[in-house]
Amino acid sequence: MRFDILTIFPESLAGFFATGVLRQAQEKKLLEVHLHDLRDFTDDPHRTVDDRPYGGGAGMVLKADPFVRAIERIKAEAGIELRTILLSSQGHLLRQDDAVRWATLPGLLLLCGRYEGVDERVTAFVDEEVSIGDYVLAGGEVAAAAIVEATARMLAGVVGKFESVETDSFYGKARLGPPQYTRPPLFRGLEVPEVLLSGDHSKIEAFRERRAWEKTARNRPDLLGLDLDRGNPHG
Ligand code: ADE
């Protein structure tokens, strides 16, 4: 699968994709990542990407023209279908089933916003607008990295054991994944639950299932339809 990312800070993402499972997947030719600098799609000597907002207000807005020129050129050069996604705090919330859906496609073109946002007319040239959570980032780069990683994990061969994908939080079930433990069996007075040392796989499975639901009820009651008003988790 091919991922193209358009950003004013391509260097901020290069190291991320040169590491770990994403690096291995590129070496195995399971995925390609192409980083593009938005400034390369400007047409003025100052390589201007932003301007002041119509109607006034603080901050700057990324101009529509470099984005649209980049979308057209990158798609033409790729020569395959690229689903175009704008990262913004106003998008639909990213979920695991989005990653599952995108992993069936030939490629994604991810557009990173910055500053106060992107000229709204860019949305006429994109397929989806996606947010990674109800908070505002300085730009879409971290969100693009999250989308590539979540989607790549759904491709055959990227994660060593697909079983580890199936037991993940959210995969196929509206609950978090079960808690995990490794050696030593006693750490600072905290024991590994005995059942995990028993070798009894049906008991272990039942224990993990129960603990996964307990943890979901505690940390994500919204997934169970129990409590949509989380309040202050630190309060
Ligand atoms: N850009 C700024 N905030 C964002 C968010 N929450 N998700 C995706 N892109 C963003």
Image: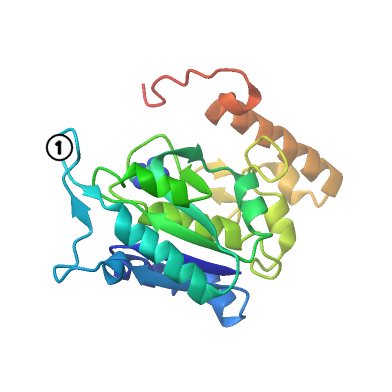
Which one is nearer the viewer's eye here, 169 or 92?
A: 92
Residue 200 lies, in percent from the top left, at 84, 48
For ligand 1, which image quadrant applies?
top left
Q: In this image, 216 relative to 124: left or right?
A: right
Give the amino acid at mark 1. Answer: Ala
Q: Which residue is nearer to you in this view: 175 or 68?
A: 68
The colour mode here is: rainbow
Q: Is residue 144 left or right of residue 39?
A: right
Q: Position of residue 61 (x, y in %)?
A: 23, 47
Q: Residue at x 41, y 25 (%)?
A: 233
Q: Does 114 appear above or below 34?
A: above
Label 1 within 8 A of ligand 1 by Cβ: no
Residue shown at 56% from the left, 55% from the top = 150
For residue 197, side relative to residue 227 (left or right): right
On the image, the x and y values in percent for residue 204 come to: 78, 44
Q: Residue at x 62, y 43 (%)?
A: 179
The answer to whether residue 19 shows anywhere in this view is: no
In the image, taking residue 229 as reference, residue 14 lies left or right, namely: left
Give x and y (percent) for residue 40.
Answer: 29, 71
Classify 10 Å Cα crowding around label 1: few (below 14), some (14-19), many (20 and above).
few
Residue 105 vs 119, above or below: the answer is: below
Secondary structure type for disc 1: loop
Quadrant in which residue 214 is drawn? top right
The structure residue drawn at horizontal position 48% and vertical position 17%, both measured from the top left corner, is: 229
Report the number of discs.
1
User: Which part of the image, by quadrant, shows the C terminus?
Assistant: top left
Tell me the residue that label 1 is attached to. 58
Q: Is residue 128 visible?
A: yes
Q: Nearer the viewer, residue 20 or 152?
A: 152
Does 126 sit above or below residue 21?
A: above
